[in-house]
Amino acid sequence: MMSQAEIAISEYRHHPTDTGSSEVQIAQLSARVRHLTEHMKANRTDYATQRGLQMLVGKRRRLLDYLRRVDVGQYQNLIERLGLRR
C-alpha cells in the first residue's frame, strides 16, 4: 500500500525521478496537513501537533508564494487540483 506522500509524488511529479519540485513538495505538505487536521479534531489539546501543523501550513504557504511568483499558471493549476482556498 502506498503512503500519502508516495501518492502525492506520483501524481504531481514532472518526470520519473522528480521528488523535490515545488509542486511535489506542496502536494506532500497538503497530504500531511489533511492528516494532522483530522488528528487535531480528535485530540484538541495536543499542542505539539498543533505547533507542527502550523509550521507545515506556513511552509506550504511560502512554497505557494514562490510558485506564484515563478509561474502563475502552474500555481493556479496546482491550487485547483489540490482544492486549496485562495
Image (tube, rainbow, N blue to C red):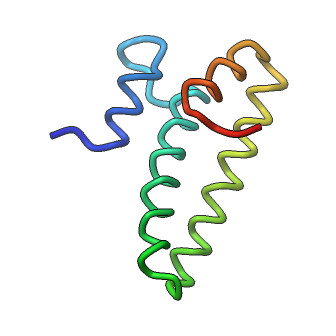
Residue in view at x 79 percent, y 36 percent: 65
Decide: is 48 above or below 39. Answer: below
Residue farthest toward the right in the current orientation of the protein? 69
Seen in the image, is 4 located left or right of residue 44? Answer: left
Residue farthest toward the left in the current orientation of the protein? 1
Residue in view at x 73 percent, y 46 percent: 61
What is the x, y in percent for residue 6? Answer: 32, 35
What is the x, y in percent for residue 76? Answer: 71, 21
Residue placed most toward the observer, 17 or 25? 25
Seen in the image, is 72 located left or right of residue 2? Answer: right
Looking at the rendered image, the quarter that the C terminus falls into is: top right
Decide: is 33 above or below 64. Answer: below
Residue placed most toward the observer, 81 or 19? 81
Decide: is 85 above or below 13. Answer: below
The total number of labels drawn is: 0
What is the x, y in percent for residue 81? Answer: 55, 24
Seen in the image, is 25 located left or right of residue 38? Answer: right
**Quadrant housing residue 53:** bottom right
What is the x, y in percent for residue 85? Answer: 70, 39
Residue in view at x 58 percent, y 74 percent: 50
Decide: is 69 above or below 36. Answer: above
Looking at the rendered image, the quarter that the N terminus falls into is: top left
